[in-house]
Image: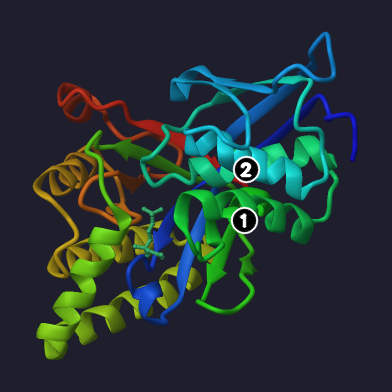
Amino acid sequence: MALRLHPHASACGKVILLGEHSVVHGYPALAAGLSDGIALEANALPNATDTMTLAIPEWDLDLSLTADSEHPVARACHEVLTHCDGPVTGWSIRGRSRIPSRAGLGSSAALTVALARLALGEDAEHGEVVAASLAGERVFHGQPSGIDSHVAAAGGVLQFIRGRDPEPVPLREPLRLLVMPSGVPRSTADQVAKVSDRLKRLPALARPALELLGAAVREGRTALERADYSRLGEIMDISHETLSGLGVSSRVLDELCADARDGGALGAKLTGAGGGGCCIALPPEHTSIALDALLARGIEPFEVEVSP
Ligand code: PMV
């Protein structure tokens, strides 16, 4: 067992740019890593046998990391450290994050990837880091697809098809996005079940909607690679309306997207499971989206950059 943790490690958060829900049914999706998802710092405690601790003020987390903890975050972190053959006592870990937790922005994958890097080092091999992250992700999500861990470790934009290795999508320049957390909790499992139910009851309508979402990924990828943002924005708008047609939007999410478009966004959509969670909007080049209407709703939008 390694006795030391590295002093610093970081990992990305994630948004799904295009293709949520249709990805469950075999179509491609595009996911993007949000820089500054989380940064961890480890400090040795006075005794090597002192209980390991984790504090992330922005996520209201202040935990003892023990295998038998009732807190899933503590158990997940313990799994990651054990998987990495790292120390499981004797260190205090402190984190800073710019993304909210439990909002579909990949916070758990960011944490488990950064923790794996504390144990293995920032230069650890991608596959090794993802495997360690997945050991923790299984505590939260049962059988996760793995996309969150891959994006948290790799950053950039990845195209993902179920059952295949993710493929990096080259960007010409950093991609700016406005993230709009609705503050409404959501259940990914419930939203996925809603779409599957609609597909069963109304296949003649739901199947073409899923095909359209898959086509939006193909068209959106080309627009992204060409840095054609007005086209990408239009594709985001169409995706949002189609997801809404599948029943996974909500009045609040529709209103956030409308506010962003009124504020100058080139396009806006829900991201992730829907029903709550977050929306994303594409700012016009060289300027920002007007936030007044969004702020008046009491939400806290924030701009992020996806690195090429
Ligand atoms: O909101 P999230 O990060 O849980 O995203 C869910 C994405 C879905 O396509 C709806 C489900 C999935 O497993 O891909």
The x, y position of residue 76, in whole percent, is: 58, 42
Residue toward you, 105 or 74: 74
Which badge, 2 or 1, comes first in the chain's sequence? 2
Against 196, residue 114 (above or below) is above
Q: Quadrant of residue 131?
A: bottom right
In the rendering, which numbered label is found on residue 112? 2
Residue drawn 22% across the image and 79% down it? 209
User: Could you say which disc has been placed on residue 268 in the image?
Assistant: none
Residue 183 visible in rendering:
yes
Viewer-proximal residue among 6 and 267: 6
Q: Is residue 70 above or below residue 13?
A: above
* Residue 203 higher or lower than 215, as above or below: below
Q: Is mark 2 within 8 Å of ligand 1?
A: no
Marks 2 and 1 sit apart, C-alpha to C-alpha, by 8 Å
Name the residue type under label 1: Leu
Residue at image location 19% in from the left, 82% down from the top: 199
Which of the 4 quarters of the picture holds residue 60?
top left
Foreground of the two, 55 or 277? 55
User: Are the two marked residues, 2 and 1, in contact with CB atoms closer than 8 angstroms?
Assistant: yes
The mark tally for this picture is: 2
Q: Which residue is mark 1?
A: 134
Name the residue at 85% across, 19% down: 48
Name the amino acid, label 2. Thr
Most extreme residue toward the top is: 46
- Give residue 210's position: percent from left, percent from top: 28, 79
For residue 91, above or below residue 236 = above
